[in-house]
Amino acid sequence: MSTPTGAETVVKQYVDDLTLALAQLETGAMTDVLETLVLALRAGDRVFVAGNGGSSTAAIHIASDLTAASDGLSAAPHAVALTENVARVTAIANDFSYDEIFSRQLAGWGRPRDVVLLLSVSGHSANLVRAAKVGRELGMTVLAALGNAGEIARLADRSVIFGQADYGLTEDLHVALGHMAVRVLRGGDACRYTDGRAR
């Protein structure tokens, strides 16, 4: 007889925790963040996305989805993850400081009216705090999706706090934010796989 691993209990608890996190989501704050992203893309301004750890890959996921969903808009918008070029990130970290991996990229690329979306569980990551400060100096709109308010929330023009500072839940909701933005760009339509293609 096999020994129970407790996985079923964990699955049920995680589903309950995620359901609660969704129920507690500040929909007004999320709407403000999404509308800012969509308006920037439709105006042809750029959206930069940044995060550490699991949020670094969420940044790539979100930027990729926003670019794909924006295809065909007249202003040719685009989104860029500041984590996607490993050579650039590690060069900045090695030559200057890990705390500057995002701010130095923004200083070179950011323009007034561009948007930077910062993803963090703690709300205190030094490199994201620096990115927020540089973004504000450049006249960019600073957005934040956080598990805990922290210093980043104080620097952001708009922020949404979700996931109860739980790394798994917050990072799940980072990706959900990106998927919600895609639906807004698509006029509310879901993107479903049908007959060999996404629709």
Image: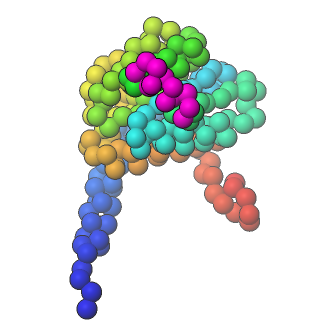
Q: Is residue 170 left or right of residue 165?
A: right
Residue 88 lies in the magenta stretch: yes
Q: Quadrant of residue 16?
A: bottom left
Q: Residue at x 60, y 51 (%)?
A: 190
Relative to the observer, which residue lies in front, 30 or 5? 5
What scheme was used to colour the molecule? rainbow
Relative to the observer, which residue lies in front, 95 or 152? 95
Q: How many marks?
A: 0
Q: Quadrant of the N terminus?
A: bottom left
Range covered by the magenta-colored residues = 86-97
The vertical placement of 172 against 101, above or below, is below
Q: Residue at x 57, y 14 (%)?
A: 108
Residue that protrudes farthest toward the bottom in the picture? 1
Q: Quadrant of residue 14?
A: bottom left
Q: Is residue 10 left or right of residue 59?
A: left
The vertical placement of 105 against 72, above or below, is above
Residue 105 coordinates in the image, percent (x, y)? 53, 20
Residue 195 coordinates in the image, percent (x, y)? 74, 65
Residue 198 coordinates in the image, percent (x, y)? 69, 55
Q: Quadrant of the C terminus?
A: bottom right
SS majority, magenta: helix
The vertical placement of 16 against 123, above or below, is below
Q: Residue at x 28, y 46 (%)?
A: 166
Relative to the observer, which residue lies in front, 92 or 194? 92
Q: Residue at x 25, y 75 (%)?
A: 5
Residue 41 coordinates in the image, percent (x, y)? 62, 27
Instruction: Residue 113: tell me if it is visible.
Output: no
Residue 72 lies in the magenta stretch: no
Q: Quadrant of residue 46?
A: top right
